[in-house]
Amino acid sequence: MTLHLVKLAISNIRSRRTRSWLTILGVLIGVTAVVSLLSIGTGVEQAVLQQFKDIGYDIIVITSGGAGRAFAGGPMGAAGFDGPPGMTGAPTSPTGSSFAPGEMGEAATAPGTATTGRTFSPGQIGASSNTTSSSSSSTPAAQTSTQAVPVVDTDALLKAVAGLVEAGNLGTRVVSVDGPLASGFLRVTTPSLSFLSAFPSILGGFKIASGTTFTNTTENEVVIGARSAGSLGIGVGDGITIDGKGFTVVGILAPSKATSAESSAASRSTRAGAARAVASTANGISGGASLLARGMTNTDDSLFVLQERAVSLWSSQAANSFTIVRMATGVKVAEVMTNISAELAAQGVKATPVSVQQIAASIQGTLGMIETVLASIAAVALIVGGVGLMNTMYTSVLERTREIGILKAVGARDGQVLALFLVDSGLMGLIGGVLGLLLGGVLSFFGTRLLGPALGVGSFQPVFGATLIVGVLVASFVIGALSGTWPAWRASRLNPVEALAAE
Amino acid sequence: MITFHDVYKTYLMGETRVEALQGVTVELPERRLAVIMGPSGSGKSTLLHLAGCLDTPTRGRVNYNGTDLGALSSRGRADFRAKSVGFVFQKFNLIPNLTALRNVEIPLLLQNKPASEARKRALDALNAVELSDRMHHRPSKLSGGEQQRVAIARSLINDPKLILADEPTGNLDTQTGQRILLLLKSLVEKGKTVVVVTHNPEIAASADTLVLLRDGKVESFSTSHGKEGRV
């Protein structure tokens, strides 16, 4: 009987083709919205969490300077360049594109203002560049007196806290650089030797394309990101002046996986701001979250100087500073965190430890909340589609009153008439659901291609779980059937004689 | 045998109370052509609807072979319509978006008969009314006479003993009407009880039993054997 009802319902749908398709369209739009938003949302969540998984849930980030210190931009961003002599003279970015205040705010923090969170201004750039060009030994950064951030003694930390197996420091600061082709401000990243040996993956593997890595801690050696090397016009063995001090280029890094297009799109896009807000959701963990989730994807624009060397060269200058530690398997995270805090206090370092687990859980929670809100909005579209379907079914009952009378005259029971209309509306809902699922899938694939670079999570795929697919199909059929319930009930209760008399 | 015992039927038409039947008592014999005549509003169609379980009496009893039709539940009435009676209407009442064949199949499908059986019996029924060549046409592509023959085929698909026809020739030309009349008479010869509501005197002339209604009451009752029926 069910099959006969379905056949009858299909012939009813086909006989009212235009109206049926318009009704199905309403459901289709709602389902498309739900599917695309949920699959993209889940995809973003998994992509972000995968980054944490790659880093490892056994990692703890210690952010120097206390909780709530925002990490503006990635640690490897370029601060700014003068164009080479003889060129336009206008400040340009390392990629050669026009300099924009927005880019500066994303890419760098002004020298000496890192701890206060103030951002670069074009005016500062011009002044700084001029100063740098005329007198490389006297930069605004060098002249600025700011609060020094004590560096965590990682050896002491490993000894003092049971359950830690590796630790390393990583700092960033903005410096003035004079190269053969260009001069200006760049961000220098200062990993400790222990950091490089324990956590190279956080620096994109720190793969040397030419030359070597650092050879000692007593000489001024610098390793340069691929794009910076090109912009500055230097190669392995060349000399370079950083904050007035002579350095020798010992190695040039291989280009990072993050493309320049991705990083620049991320810095320009307003959606990137939203993503960063997600990554920095909890004030207390914002620095670590940004550092781990975003900052390490691009090493191309930075210079690298060993921290052991940097502390003796820039002892009075402020910097962003992080310490990364790895826990042993099976230790109690809370206990380790407490012990780390105690040791930091003992070392006189004002810093906050945050575990990757905490960061990931916080981000997951925020993403989940955003997903729920988006899905709720999409659900409203689905409900609107359901109301449209109810309207169609109600009109259909009015139009088919005579037909209902005929069916009853030839022996249809009330329940069969009810079922016929329910199958009719449920089928329209289901068709809308299937088509919405397909369209939502297509939109999701295109959406992720656009959103991936913009959100700074690289390329990622939308996630179509069995729950989503089955849930959407069942929900669309149920919404369709529920929308048809009242009209169908009315149809089933019609008196056959009155129904047959209808025109 | 269909018997009406002091049957009243009252319904509301807007705010007007209509006394469609007022104490009708009559017996319609089996395997005969019974014709109900009377002016418009006399209660002819109402009487037919009560006989076919499309409606229930306000008062009184309608019996079919000993079953009190008024006492049946909604489901019982639906089953009665499905198995025991076939309807033929003046306006044909075919489902417009189904082909002739599917229109004829519907009563069997509603009884959960296998599709193959329904298809075979529908083809036989359409053959019986000489419409097998038009079975894939929708009602809108059929003439009035063809539509009525499809309706008759549908009424026969369950092989019911009772055929109720409400003005079956009302929308047909004379020649087609005669053809339908012959068809109905052939059903009586095959042992069916056929009750026809009509204004057509030609059909009345062929009746075994003639009931004349006026103002919801039986005005006269006669049989082809000349004896007065019970009124």
Image (cartoon, coloured by chain):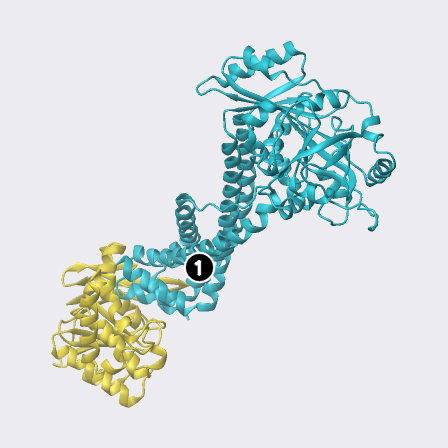
Q: In the image, is residue A8 above or below residue A262?
A: below
What's the amino acid at mark 1? Met
Which residue is at the front of the view, B154 or A355? A355
Q: Position of residue A138 (x, y in %)?
A: 85, 30
Q: Is residue A98 left or right of residue A436?
A: right
Image quarter where the C terminus of chain B lies is: bottom left
Q: What chain is the yellow one? A: B
Is residue A61 visible in the rendered image? The answer is no
Q: Which residue is mark 1?
A: A393
Q: Position of residue A135 (x, y in %)?
A: 87, 34
Q: Is residue A49 left or right of residue B20?
A: right
Among the 4 quarters of the image, the one containing residue B22: bottom left
Among the 4 quarters of the image, the one containing residue A363: top right
**Residue found at x 61% / y 34%:** A212
Q: In the image, is residue A344 above or below residue A72?
A: above
Q: Is residue A150 left or right of residue A461?
A: right
Q: Is residue A142 left or right of residue A415?
A: right
Q: How many C-alpha atoms fall within 10 Å of the one at disc 1: few (<14), some, or many (≥20)?
A: many
Q: Tally the numbered discs.
A: 1
Q: Position of residue A225 (x, y in %)?
A: 65, 38
